[in-house]
Amino acid sequence: MTVIDLVSYEDALASFDPVMGLEVHVELGTATKMFCGCSTALGAEPNSQTCPVCLGLPGALPVVNATGVESAVRIGLALHCEIARWCRFARKNYFYPDMPKNFQTSQYDEPIAFNGYLDVQLEDGEVFRVEIERAHMEEDTGKSTHVGGATGRIHGASHSLLDYNRAGIPLIEIVTKPIVGAGERAPEVARAYVAELRELIRSLGVSEARMEMGQMRCDVNLSLRPHGREKFGTRSETKNVNSLRSVERAVRFEVRRHAGVLSSGGTIVQETRHFHEEDGSTTSGRVKEEAEDYRYFPEPDLVPVAPDPAWVEELRVSLPEPPRVRRNRLREEWGLTAHEMQSVLNAGALDPIVATIEAGADQAAARKWWLGELARRANEQGVDLIALPITPEQVARVAELVSEGTLNDKLARQVIEGVLAGEGGPDEVVAGRGLAIVSDDGALGTAVDEAIAANPAIADKVRGGKVAAAGALVGAVMKATRGQADAARAREMILERLGVQG
């Protein structure tokens, strides 16, 4: 299939209805792996966080991570799922180098949570309900690094390296029911769902869900059916899509590709596909296995999981405010328009702003710094706002220094620059760089007198009643003091010296 075979998105929708299924894997933020005591910390030497259990050595017996089970129940409850009174693990058998046991411990026909939903709000305010089929517990695989090729994939590589540190890390897989009725907004619905799910996971505190780090990955299943038909078409599955933008692009591309194949009389192959970030395309991976190909059977080395109903209810009442409800409440409290709130969300600034307000800043100042200077720097570095090395407390202190007159906006931006450069907190940067505003009448008076003396023509204009010309003298004072003068006080002193009423 080439790009030439694609049809336009509009032409595809003229003949077909998109049907989606989204499978999201979330890496839980537990201290140890799902079935053993090995650390889950990032950055360790390859294969240094392994043991006989996660390597699948003979005689090693797994034990379920209690925090992993609690996280799964909390996720299920937040997704309005039913929680199983009794469930168990299964072995999903397949043979690949990054799976040291040659099977994955997962859940098959008895998930811990099922039959739920998540309401997602689109940019125009419309709410779309995505129904959840199941959320189940499983373990992650190891990591293969293919070396010697041009693409980083196995094809063309000279050899592969295996790191089993990730093998056994707890995952929750959340599977939607078929998403129908989205029509032309299918890509937007897919993106909004994954975004809402990410915010939900973060609000629960069970994972940072950072897609760029692989802590949350989405498999995009898509099929098309001709208008008026009930039966779904053959689906493709685009694997491991790792950004919100990529989820949207993958859906859009697959709609166009499927429509191109079907419109030309071809047949869709049920297969996995790889997403290419550089151009938003997908390419064929392998023919997709059916469930029976994995030869699922109950895991004999683990006892069933039977959550106590009373405990489940305790977890239910402890759930935080749902992200969509929280966003709408904050928008009303802050007096923002829908567009202004969307700007906050698009920048990933909501939580940093809330934390900055909690640290003492007013919401206008918090929004100003996170959406302005800090968003600019995050964009320049290609990172999320939360990845910047500055805390909400430090941003609140910068805002406080501005409000009390110690800094102006220009100096505050230099303070933020210093904090990001690792020069310390705001007060340390102010002291180290000598950035406080010059408001002392003695030092400021000297700068004012020098500005008047250096610009006699402008001074005469001010004396003659052209008060607006004083701005040029204020500018000279600001230049002389490297922007550190109190501009308002400098203007007052200029007019006083020239005998003019302000």
Image: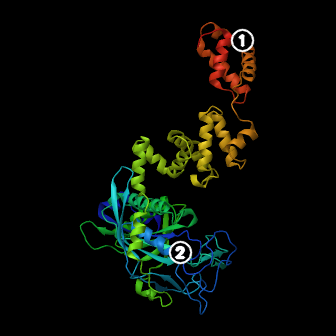
Decide: few, some or many residues near mark 2? Use Cα within 10 Å; few <14, some 14-19, many ≥20: many
Residue 222: x %, y % from top left? 39, 69
Q: How is the image coloured?
A: rainbow
Q: Position of residue 144 (x, y in %)?
A: 61, 77
Q: Quadrant of the C terminus?
A: top right
Residue 352 x, y percent position in the rendering:
54, 50
Identity, as a three-letter code, of the amino acid under mark 1? Pro
Q: Which of 372 and 290 lies nearest the eye of the viewer?
A: 372
Q: Residues within 10 Å of mark 1 (few under 14, many from 20)?
A: few
Identify whether 44 is placed above or below 393. below
Q: Residue at x 60, y 45 (%)?
A: 395
Camera sees residue 235:
no
**Residue 176: image tag:** none
The reply, left or right, for residue 258 in relation to residue 479 is left
Seen from this angle, which residue lies furthest bottom?
Answer: 59
- Can you give x and y, in whole percent of width and height, for residue 291 in the image? 41, 84
> How far apart are labels 2 and 1 at the CA level?
75 Å
Q: In the rendered structure, which disc, 2 or 1, sits on the residue that comes first in sequence?
A: 2
Task: Indicate which disc residue 456 carries.
Answer: 1
Q: Splitting the image into 4 quarters, where does residue 200 fall?
A: bottom left
- The outermost residue toward the left is 228
Tell me which residue sits at (40%, 60%) in the image. Answer: 187
Which residue is identified by label 2?
A: 170
Name the residue furthest top.
464
Closer mark to the observer between disc 2 and disc 1: 2
Element on which disc 2 rests? strand
